[in-house]
Image: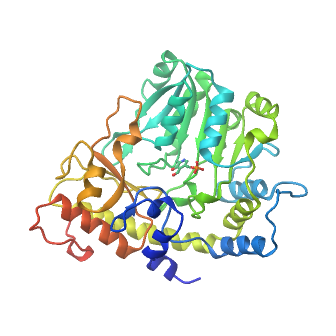
């Protein structure tokens, strides 16, 4: 495997494919929005897919014995996190949005409250809203040096609001926080007191930086495991989001029983390709993941330096995980009604619009944008340079990594 996979990207290849990230844009706009990476996929994943294609093995899936995706998930949780998922309690799904929809349906009733940290992954807010349940936002606030939430009085507030479920996104999107053992323990206490079902989305768990340690919520103890649905996939860390294969380990007995009474076709059927890709990612791609994380870590530092060097203040805390950076542009020279749209127009860069991450709540994140930094260094510098150019006076010097002072 060459480092070249991370050093350079081929914009023409990306624009010419079927991926929405680049395909949906005008030809002079740089893509820094949807959470796909520009790096391609691990060699073992490509080989596994090619072997299936060479065998013309594209029929309905069948494996004798345990599904290899579930085996790979259970082994990975054990080896990376010391958590042993209960055997026989994991199912495969096509994606995490599907998991959320199914679990809302089977563990809450219309009108119930569902707590979730906000800002958060926009389709989750849209899904809760559409389901007729009530979003109870847990605001991610500036706690001095990082984003965090206030556990003080949380149990009482959630009781009052008839909360029945907690949707935990950890590592968190878009702030990139990796919740600490203390933060998770406080959420576990609240969940136990209120008898909540916890849906723990751990899709970004492989993408932690430095000495950050991901702790599966279900690993906190017997009670936590018995009320937690752990949902994850290989799609973010190994760049195979279009494959559509995810897993959910279901702790709550009542939810498991309810799911068991559904017909199999209710759950959809991830393809052979998606399953062999997931297994190859989870069992044969650690060297690729290590190289990826080194690249992302360097890019994260470039963004940090860039924000320090800007002639106006941008609130930004370097993410502890993910390849996403959450930036407050309220002091920047951009249209404060929709910074992302303004930057697409003037900087020719597509970012994720901040307002979407707090939709259907009273929290206002209009002044924010989310940058996807899973790209080559030179493309990232181009993106940041364009944003700087559009948000400062035309006479401002062009930004380069070397020009940073702080
Ligand atoms: C926190 C989080 N959960 C879920 C998803 C989407 O997962 P899926 O494509 O499996 O629905 C994303 C995608 O970016 C995400 O960031």
The N terminus - image quarter: bottom right
In this view, the residue in front, 80 or 113, is: 113
Residue at image point 71% right, 43% down = 249
Q: Please, which residue is most extreme toward the top here? A: 160
Q: Please, which residue is most extreme toward the left here? A: 395
Quarter of the image for residue 40 reads bottom right
From the viewer's perspective, is residue 246 above or below residue 198?
Answer: below
From the viewer's perspective, is residue 95 above or below residue 398?
Answer: above
From the viewer's perspective, is residue 171 above or below residue 221?
Answer: below
Circle count? 0
Q: Please, which residue is most extreme toward the right here? A: 64
In this view, the residue in front, 166 or 79, is: 166
From the viewer's perspective, is residue 325 above or below residue 253?
Answer: below
Residue at image point 45% right, 65% down = 374
Task: Note whether residue 150 is visible.
Answer: yes
Q: Is residue 179 left or right of residue 273?
A: left
Q: Is residue 303 left or right of residue 117?
A: left
**Which percent across, then down, holds residue 93?**
70, 47
Quarter of the image for residue 153 reads top left
Q: How is the image coloured?
A: rainbow
**Which percent across, then down, holds residue 86?**
78, 44
**Which percent across, then down, holds residue 43?**
64, 76
Residue at image point 72% right, 32% down = 252
Task: Note whether residue 217 is visible.
Answer: no
The C terminus - image quarter: bottom left
Quarter of the image for residue 337 reads top left
Q: Is residue 369 left or right of residue 289?
A: left
**Which percent across, then down, holds residue 399?**
21, 71
């Amino acid at each position: 495997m060459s480092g070249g996979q991370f050093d350079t990207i081929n914009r023409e290849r990306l624009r010419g494919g079927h991926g929405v990230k680049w395909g949906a844009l005008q030809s002079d706009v740089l893509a820094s929005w949807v959470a796909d990476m520009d790096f391609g996929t691990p060699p073992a994943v490509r080989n596994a897919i090619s072997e299936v294609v060479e065998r013309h093995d594209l029929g309905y899936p069948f494996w004798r014995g345990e599904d290899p995706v579930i085996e790979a998930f259970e082994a990975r949780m054990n080896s990376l996190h010391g958590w042993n998922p209960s055997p026989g309690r994991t199912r495969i799904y096509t994606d995490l949005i599907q998991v959320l929809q199914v679990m809302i349906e089977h563990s809450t009733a219309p009108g119930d409250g569902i707590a979730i940290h906000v800002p958060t992954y926009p389709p989750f807010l849209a899904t809760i809203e559409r389901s007729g349940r009530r979003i109870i936002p847990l605001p991610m606030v500036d706690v001095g040096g990082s984003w965090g939430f206030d556990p003080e009085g949380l149990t009482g507030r959630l009781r009052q609001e008839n909360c029945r479920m907690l949707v935990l996104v950890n590592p968190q999107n878009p702030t990139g926080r990796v919740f600490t053992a203390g933060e998770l323990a406080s959420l576990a206490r609240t969940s136990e007191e209120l008898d909540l079902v916890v849906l723990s989305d751990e899709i970004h768990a492989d993408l932690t930086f430095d000495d950050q340690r991901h702790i599966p919520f279900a690993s906190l103890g017997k009670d936590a495991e018995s009320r937690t649905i752990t949902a994850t996939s290989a799609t973010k860390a190994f760049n195979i989001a279009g494959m559509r294969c995810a897993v959910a380990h279901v702790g709550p007995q009542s939810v498991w029983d309810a799911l068991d009474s559904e017909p199999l076709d209710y759950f959809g059927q991830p393809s052979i390709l998606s399953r062999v890709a997931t297994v190859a990612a989870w069992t044969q791609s650690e060297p690729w993941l290590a190289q990826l994380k080194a690249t992302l870590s360097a890019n994260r530092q470039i963004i940090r330096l860039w924000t320090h060097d800007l002639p106006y203040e941008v609130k930004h805390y370097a993410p502890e995980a993910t390849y996403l950076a959450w930036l407050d542009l309220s002091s920047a020279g951009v249209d404060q009604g929709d910074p992302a749209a303004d930057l697409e127009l003037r900087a020719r860069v597509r970012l994720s619009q901040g307002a979407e991450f707090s939709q259907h709540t009273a929290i206002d994140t209009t002044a924010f944008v989310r940058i996807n930094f899973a790209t080559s260094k030179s493309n990232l510098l181009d993106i940041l340079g364009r944003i700087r150019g559009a948000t400062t006076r035309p006479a401002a010097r062009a930004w380069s990594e070397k020009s940073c002072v702080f």
